[in-house]
Image: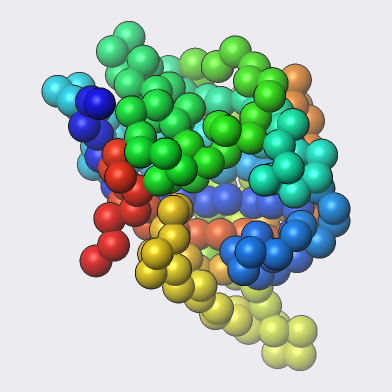
Amino acid sequence: MTPWELKGPSLVNCTCDYGCNCQFNGLPDKGHCHAVAGIQIDEGHYGETRLEGLRIAAIFKWPGAIHEGNGEALTFVDEAADEAQREALLKIMTGQDTAPFATMFAVYASTVTKMNPPVFTRIDLDLDVDGRTGRISIPNYVETTGEPIRNKVTGLPSRTLILQPEGFEYSVAEIGSASSRTQGPVAVEMKDTYGQFARLHLNNNGVVHA
């Protein structure tokens, strides 16, 4: 198994209402799960291959709960990545060189029956985890925006965190609101639904918890 590790901010938008039942071992509140995710790699490596400064993203579409399978996915890799970096990132994103079910990459890959060919393209990310704001923009494929949840009376930002000391994706997530629209082989659309902002720290064996 080739050792790998990555650190950086992420934004995930899914079809669930704020909170997302999946975070609490529940079923998706719409009966299905559609999601868009983007990750900025501030620090990272796959063996001797350096990954810092690169970006990855994905669109997922499950007809029911994630664990029921039959999902479809489309992955995106930063066009700035060279051949070795592309291969490394795709292996990480598809759950290879990872202990069984140790990361969300491995978990989600095990539930996908249709993996579309990866797209190597420009990925624009602007993520502020603490401010709960962000944007994922992939020309001709993805437009996602994230913002804080706002108090219905005052209009002020409302802050909520989810802590997962033994989670397979993050240790702490800031919860906001997000909206997405995608084009291409995996089309999804969400408006003012669950937005998850987190600082990821992952390796072959899962989340590196502080």
| Quarter occupied by residue 185 | top right
| Place of residue 168 in the rendered image (x, y in percent of width and height, measured from the top left) | 44, 53
> In this picture, is 30 found above or below 47?
below
Q: How is the image coloured?
A: rainbow
Q: Is residue 119 above or below residue 174?
A: above
**Position of residue 79 measured from the top left corner of the image (x, y, whole percent):** 43, 18
Whether residue 2 can be seen here = yes
Q: Is residue 169 left or right of residue 84?
A: right
* Left or right: 87 in relation to 132: left
* Extreme residue toward the front, this view: 100
| Closest to the observer, 192 or 21 | 21
- x 64%, y 64%: residue: 25
The residue positioned farthest toward the left in the image shown: 48
Observer able to see residue 39: no
The residue positioned 46% from the left and 43% from the top of the image is 101
* Quadrant (top left/top right/bottom left/bottom right) for the C terminus: bottom left
| Residue at x-position 38% and y-position 69% | 165
For the residue pair 155 and 31, the one nearer the viewer reads as 31
**Which residue is the extreme one toward the top?**
83
Residue 89 spot, x, y in % from top left = 38, 25
Q: Position of residue 22 (x, y in %)?
A: 65, 60
Task: Indicate whether 56 appears above or below 178.
Answer: above
Count the marks. 0
Q: Residue at x 50, y 68 (%)?
A: 174
The quarter of the picture where the N terminus appears is top left
158 above or below 82? Answer: below
Extreme-right residue of the structure: 31
